[in-house]
Each structure stands twice: as structure tokens, then as C-alpha cells.
Amino acid sequence: MVGRLSFAGSLVVAALVLTGCGPSSYEVYLRCGDPGLIASSTGPVTDPALREISGIVAGRVNPSQWWVHNDSGDSARLFALDNQGAVTRQYQLTGAMAVDWEDLAIGRGPLANTTYLYAADIGDNSSARAEIVVYRVPEPVVTPGPAIALGGVEILRLRYPDGAHNAEALLVDPTTGDLVIVEKKQAGGVIGVYRTAGNPAAGSLTTLERAGEINVGTGVSNAVTGASISESGSEIALRVYSGTRIFARGAGQSVTQAMADVACNGPTPPEVQGEAIAFEADGSGYVTISEGTGQTLHHYRIP
């Protein structure tokens, strides 16, 4: 497939190879044999506090904003960015801690017609944590201003059924409300996919179910560093160090079943350390961003 890449106002023709595509049609942007894909970059993110972005989601209450957070070493805070990468506001999560925040998800929760942000404190490089934590909070309406406390934070304690694991990818299934965690192995290969049965109650301790496993390919380039799911739940993206994997989810399929199918290799620019990926709020494509200071948002959309 030939893609049209437009960066900084210039138009470049480049080959965007999508391999292994099955017959399913994709809901938004990556269709096997699609005639073209527009890529653009915005930013850079200039706030010096954002030195290690590890998770990103598109706002639903605030569709013009991107929610991001830093990797380990920061406090328990979220940043709302505009589409140019400027920080609109910073939110400190009341009652939350930050051991090793690795991903950010968005989706349904305990209250109907309410969108929640899910900050995933699930990193565990030494595979030693008896429990991991996800913090759930209703997405606030973003207004410009100085840093502010964000209340209403709920603590969801999780543990694995088969010992500790390192992970950097969290999804909230819009169909079932399940929280889905994808294991990270530095050597790639066969990894576990874990889930809750429905959306956990506030303050609960939930033993995850090992829902299945997937083979992401061997080598550090295939270590899973982030994930996203479209608002309809029909497309799933996994970020690995070497790029992006896109899965079509058929009717009646679980997230794990969809990720066990053959993926398309979605285009991704060279990034210093790509760990964050998110579908656009309007379903028109996806974005990636790297860790490191002064990084840009990379957007991919169907023309």
C-alpha cells in the first residue's frame, strides 16, 4: 500500500506496508488495500514536566484534548494537551500514588452515561508486585488554568492468578466493561492476556483471569508497550517498540480472540522510545507519541 505522508506542510510519497491483513474490513482507517493514508505531526510537546509520556487517550468529554501521563518517577497526575501538544491543564489525582504508571485507558464505568479515565499503575520490571493498581476517575471538563486536584478517584486493586507479571498495556472493553491487561516480555514471544469479568467495583481486590495468550514475535522489538481500542470496540491496536499492530474484532469476539488473529502492521514513524498509542475520538485514525522531551504527536488518518 502506498501512503501519502504530510509532515510540516510537505508532501512525501512513501511505502506503508500492511502485512498479514485478513478479509475483515476495518471500521476507520486501516483497510487492506486502502489507496492511501494521511500522516501528519503536531507539536512538539514543550512542557518540561512531560519528559516521559507513557500513556495517551483521546478525550470523550473533551474531544479536542489528549490525556497523557509520565512513566515511573512522576507523581500521580494527568495532563490535558491540546492538538498542538500544549498543556491546557494539569490534574493531580487525589488519593492516588504512582509506583510505575504505564498506560492510560478511557471508557465506561459504574455510572451510566459517564466516561472514565483509567490510569494503569501496572509496571513491574522485576515481576515482584503482589498487587497492581488501576485508578478510575470520571473524565472532567477541561478548562485552562493552573494545576488542580482531581477528586472522585477510585482504587481498583488487581492481582494475577499465576504470579507477578510486567505489563504496560491496558484496555477497557466498551462492549463488556472488562479491564484487559496485555503482558510485556522484554524478549517478546508468547505473552498472556488478562481480564476482569466486567468493570470492578470501587475499592475492590480482583483476581484477574488469564483469558488467553498471543504470540507477538520474538525479540525486544516486539515487546508490548501500549494498547488502545476504538470506541465501538471493533478495532484494537498494540504498540510495540518496532511499530503498531492493528486487529479487527469481529462480532461476538472477545478482545483476546481478536488479538489471536493475524494483525495488520500499521505505519509508525521512527520514535526514540514509542510507548503510547490511542485511537482518535472520532474514529478517524490513531496517534502515537514517544517518551523523551520535546516529542511530537504523530497522527494517521484515512484521507
Image: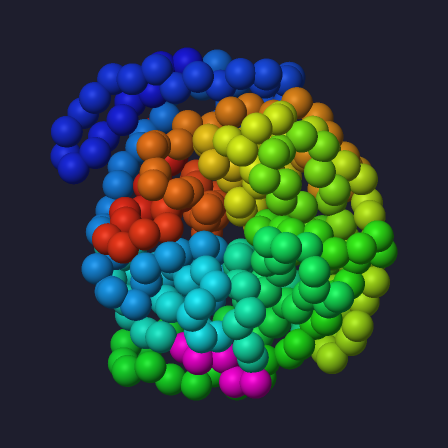
In the displayed structure, 232 sits above or below 223; it is below
Relative to 37, residue 13 above or below: above
Nearer to me, 175 or 6: 6
Is residue 8 visible from the viewing direction of this image?
yes
Residue at 76%, 37% in the rendered image: 213
Report whether 294 appears left or right of 199: left
Q: Is residue 67 left or right of residue 184?
A: left
Q: Is residue 126 above or below residue 41?
A: below
Task: Give the image location of residue 111, x and y in percent.
Answer: 68, 74
Position in image of residue 155 (x %, y %) = 66, 76
Q: Quadrant of the N terminus?
A: top left
Residue 253's quadrant in the figure? top right
Q: Which quadrant of the view contains residue 138?
A: bottom right
Pick the quarter of the image with the C terminus: top left
Indicate the position of residue 204 as horizontal and vertical percent values: 78, 75
Residue 130: in magenta span? no
From where the camera sits, is residue 35 visible?
Answer: no
Q: Nearer the viewer, residue 14 or 112?
A: 14
Residue 141 place in picture, x, y as percent? 42, 75
Q: Main secondary structure of the magenta part?
A: strand
How is this picture coloured? rainbow
- The answer to which quarter of the image holds residue 80 is bottom left
- Of residues 142 and 120, the one nearer the viewer is 120
Instruction: Give the residue displayed 33% in from the left and 81% down from the top.
Output: 147
In this rendering, is residue 121 above or below 13? Answer: below
Q: Going 83% across and 62% down the picture, which residue do you hit?
A: 207
Residue under the point 62% across and 26% down:
218
> Which region of the structure is painted magenta?
91-95
Residue 93 colored magenta? yes
Residue 245 vs residue 110: left or right?
Answer: left
